Image (spheres, rainbow, N blue to C red):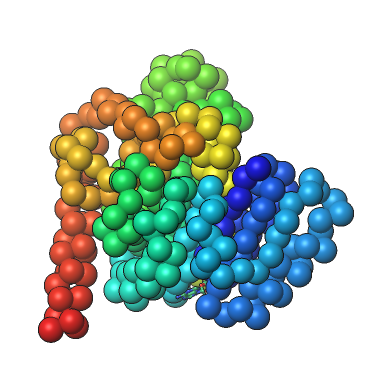
Amino acid sequence: MSKIAIIGAGDVGTTIAYTVQLRGFATEIVLVDSNRERAQGQVMDLNHGLFFVRPVHIYAGDYADCRDADVIVLTAGARQKPGENRLQLVNRNAQICEAIVEKIDPGAYAGIFLVVTNPVDIMTRVVIECSGLPRHRVMGSGTVLDSARFRYCLSRNCQVDARNIHAYVIGEHGDSEVLLWSQVHIGGTPLDVFCRQCAVACNAVVNKEKIAEAVRRSAYHIIEAKGATTYGISLAVRRILEAIVRDEHSVLTVSTWLDGHYGCSDICLSVPCIVNRSGVGQVIETRLDRSEEALLVNSAEIVKNTCRAMDRDRRRSVA
Ligand SMILES: NC(=O)c1ccc[n+]([C@@H]2O[C@H](COP(=O)([O-])OP(=O)(O)OC[C@H]3O[C@@H](n4cnc5c(N)ncnc54)[C@H](O)[C@@H]3O)[C@@H](O)[C@H]2O)c1
C-alpha cells in the first residue's frame, strides 16, 4: 500500500502521476490543484488507461487527502518562461509553497515531502523552514535529472549504455551546477583510463566543455522549443519516489539540507545521498578536485545570495 499525493496537476505533476501509474508501485495517487477542474480532467484521462496497468486508485482531491500520503510531491507553481532562469521564480513560488504547506498541517503529517517546484533548492529550504518537519523528511528532486542528462550525454559520446555510467552533478539545480568529472566511471573504470583504451579516440575529456554545456543548457533549449520540460523530470521523480516507497537505499543526488557537509551549511543543495523510506539518510561526501570544490563554493554562494534576497523582500512586504 503506497499513497502518493501530487500537488500541482500541471504538465509535470500529471506526467509524474502517469509514470507512477505505468510503473505500478502505488496503490493510490491523489492530484490536488488550485484549478480543480484541471485536476479532474487529468484524473479522468489517467483513469481511462487503468485497464492497461496494475490497479491504482487515482482521484482529484483536497489538502486533507494528502495527510496520510507516504510522499507528497510538490509541483505547484510558476514555471520558467523562455529565457528566464530558475532563480527568477523564487518569490512567486516561495509564497505558493508556504501557503500549501500551511494547508497540509505538517504537524499531522508523517510522510516525506518531495519538492520539484523551482528553484528547487530554495523551495526545499522554504518547505523545511515553514513545515518544521525533520530535515531528512524533506528533499528536492535536485540534480537527479541533471545527473541523468550527464549520463545520457556521456553515453552518446562514448557509445556506452547510460546505465553502465556513474556520473554525478551536484550543487544548485541551475546554471551554477557542478559536473563531477573527477568521479565519472564507465564500467567501474575512471573516465581518463577508459578514454586511453577507447579505439574511437574522440576523447570525452576533450569534449568536456561541449558535454557540460549540453547538460547545463538543456532545459533552456527544451523550454525554447516546446515551452516546458516534462518527461525527463517526471522519470527522475518517479525514480526518487520508488527509492522512498520501496525503501531502496539508493544513491541519488537529491537536494538536501547541508549541515557542514562539503563545507556548506544552512542551505539545501544536491549532493549524493542515500534515499530510503525515512527520507534522506547518509550524505556521501565524495572526494572533489580543487576546481570542483571551488565551483561548489560558488554554487552555494549563488543559492545563499538568492535566499538572502528572498528573505529581505519578504520582510519588506510584511513591514
Ligand atoms: N526541479 C526540476 O527539475 C523541474 C523540472 C521541470 C519543472 N519544474 C518546476 O515544476 C513546476 C511546475 O511546472 P509545470 O510545467 O507543471 O507547470 P504548469 O503551469 O503546467 O503547472 C503548475 C500547476 O500548479 C498549479 N498551481 C499554481 N498555484 C497553486 C497553488 N497555490 N495550489 C495548488 N496548485 C497550484 C497550477 O494551477 C498548475 O496546474 C514549476 O515551478 C517548474 O519550474 C521543476
Query: Which one is nearer the viewer's eye here, 275 or 295?
Result: 275
Residue farthest along the right direction in this orientation:
51
Position of 309 with respect to 147 (left or right) is left
What residue do we see at 44% from left, 64% from top?
104
Residue 62 falls in image quadrant = bottom right
Residue 182 falls in image quadrant = top left
Measuring from the top left, give residue 38's x and y in whole percent: 64, 77
In this rendering, the answer to whether 167 lies above or below 91 is above
Measuring from the top left, give residue 100's x and y in whole percent: 42, 69
In this rendering, the answer to whether 309 lies above or below 155 is below
In this rendering, the answer to whether 70 lies above or below 208 is below
Position of 106 with respect to 54 (left or right) is left
Measuring from the top left, give residue 75's x and y in whole percent: 49, 63
Query: Which one is nearer the viewer's eye here, 256 or 180?
Result: 256
What residue do we see at 38% from left, 49% from top?
138
What residue do we see at 28% from left, 28% from top?
285
Query: Which one is nearer the viewer's eye here, 29 or 183?
Result: 29
